[in-house]
Image (cartoon, helix red, strand yellow):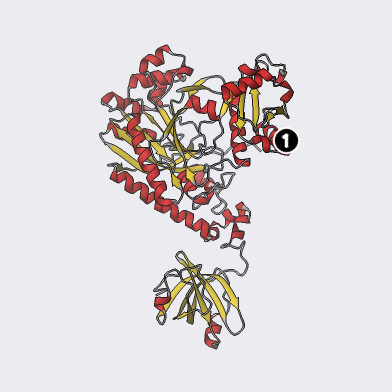
Amino acid sequence: MYRDHNCGELNIKNVGEKVTIAGWIQKIRNLGAMQFIDLRDEFGITQAVISDNEDIKKQAEGLVTECVVSITGTVVERSNKNTKIPTGEIEIDAEQIKILGKCKNVLPFEVNSEVAGEVREDLRLEYRFLDLRNEKLHKNILLRSKIMKTLRRRMDELGFTEIQTPILANSSPEGARDFLVPSRLHPGEFYALPQAPQQFKQLLMVSGFNKYYQIAPCFRDEDPRADRAPGEFYQLDFEMSFAEQEDVFKVLEDVIPTVFKEHTNWKVEEGPFIRIPYKEAMEKYGIDKPDLRNPLIIQDVSKLFKNSDFNAFKDKIVKMIVVPNGAEQGRKFFDNMTDFAKQEVGANGLAWIKVDKENAVSGGIAKFITPEMLESLNREFKLEPNASVFFMADEKLETVQKIAGLIRIELGKRLDLIQKNIYKFCLIVDFPMYELSDEGKIDFNHNPFSMPQGGMEALETKDPLDILAYQYDVVCNGYEMASGAVRNHDPELMVKAFEIAGYSEEEVENRFGALYNAFQYGTPPHAGAAPGLDRMVMLIADSDNIREVIAFPKNKKARDLMMRAPNTVMENQLKDVHIKVDIEK
């Protein structure tokens, strides 16, 4: 009724055929005697021509860009062909035009051009239904669908069973705040939206399922970030019975490169992925999600400055980044990097030197670098002539590692050292089981349901901060791509692990009663992981904003400007769920 062809399939072979197409008017060009209309749908663009015919011209009155029309006419060969599009050799000589959906004369912004990318993001999100008509954004959402199909296909081929787990669940300490849902039937009690299907997928292993997966929605009430959607996100969640760490790695090293290779023209590094212990990652890259396309490495030179006259470095932990051929940069570059360290990183400053081709030192803190220190740098760190060296120092290891990590990333960007058109993966392994919270309390570092390395003996005899866990992340180009662990399936181990983090056995039973109870009835060893779908699509689409690969995302303040959520509700709705709102004015 509305179309017999889409706007991307007609070509020179269709000349002479009478066809009907439908779509959105992208552009109208009025040349007096003739009018040209570019009609767009999801599949492409086809040009229609309105000749000097009064009936057709009358039908075309009131047409504006972005209104929806159906055009019937004969396919003819174009005199001025457009080789940039598949339909560029033909046009439709319009015989009938029907307006199917009117559009306002004035649009909030131009929706289908590069200009749309320059529009204020909040305005784009308010009119997301228009924004999604933009070709680039539209393709991102179609790409997301294709990636999900590939994930499902490959997981099915590997023998996994897709099972859905509940959305209304219980509150669980996954490391972020829960979204709570008040219960109408049970006054004063709340469901929680799952931060991840963690407990359910472990219970599926207890239930005898061999391999489970789902593309699962996860909900966390945390602050928005450029690489993480606020409130909700999706992950490929999977778990395996009778599995250890290596079994999970084989799945990750199979599925992730398969998806990337199928949907990108970039080079994709295949498995086995490089494995980097967490401690080594922090020492060499200053971060637990290193971008291996960046060749720069952080090195410790604390001993070098132990007896130095440079008081700012005395009795401090000192880190160094050597930039080959960095001496070619002018003074302004070093000043800008120092400003970045102070303003963006929060460092007190940034020390640096240049080593010229004759091995002479200049600039920055050159006067504090003695010939003996330079010789030590050359001998121990193979410092090449024509290099520049950046130094960072602090009393706390965690602080100086963070500073050095951010400086390394920025140097890689500003000096254009990042390898192009390649996806580099690594596995970060041997995460600490515990960490100190801001209040100085022992807390879980990663996932509370993980198996400690060394089992019960480690929990009973080691300093908690020295205990490692069978936890791991997959990192791609500086982004955490997946996270997982071997699970703690022993109820005694589980109680002991939570006890160290300040939970009593009674609290474990109350908060994780299903798991605790199920573990009493024969639990297989099991392990799993969860690659993030949104982040995967973002990387494959080569976007630096995760909102560009989600159909209806929230803004930076976690608001849905189009649907106007969150919003206030009626008093009777609150009464139904036994809630009174008490807001400080």
70 in relation to 173, above or below: below
| Amino acid type assigned to the residue bearing label 1 in the image | Asp
- Residue at the (37%, 33%) spot, across then down: 199
Q: Nearer the viewer, residue 50 or 442?
A: 50
User: Could you say where residue 444 lies in the image, as x and y percent from the top left?
Assistant: 47, 24
Q: Quadrant of the C terminus?
A: top right
Instruction: From this view, report whether residue 271 is shown above or below residue 554.
Output: above
Of all residues, the one furthest to the top in this rendering is: 461
Instruction: Find residue 320 and report its image quarter.
Output: top right
| Residue found at x 59% / y 59% | 114
Using the image, determine if residue 584 lies above or below residue 317: below
Local packing at callout 1 (Cα closer than 10 Å; few below 14, some 14-19, many 20+) is some
**Image position, residue 25 (x, y; %):** 53, 71
Front residue of 384/330: it is: 384
Name the residue rendered at 48%, 45% in the picture: 422
Given residues 463 and 382, the one toward you in this image is 382
Q: Residue at x 53, y 51 (%)?
A: 548
What residue is shown with label 1? 335
Q: Nearer the viewer, residue 528 or 391?
A: 391
Residue 201 in percent (x, y) is at: 34, 35
Q: Tell me the quarter of the image containing the N terminus.
A: bottom left
* Dot 1: element: helix
Q: Is residue 570 visible?
A: no
**Residue 390 sits in quarter:** top right
| Image x and y of residue 403, in percent | 62, 29
* Res 148 visible: yes
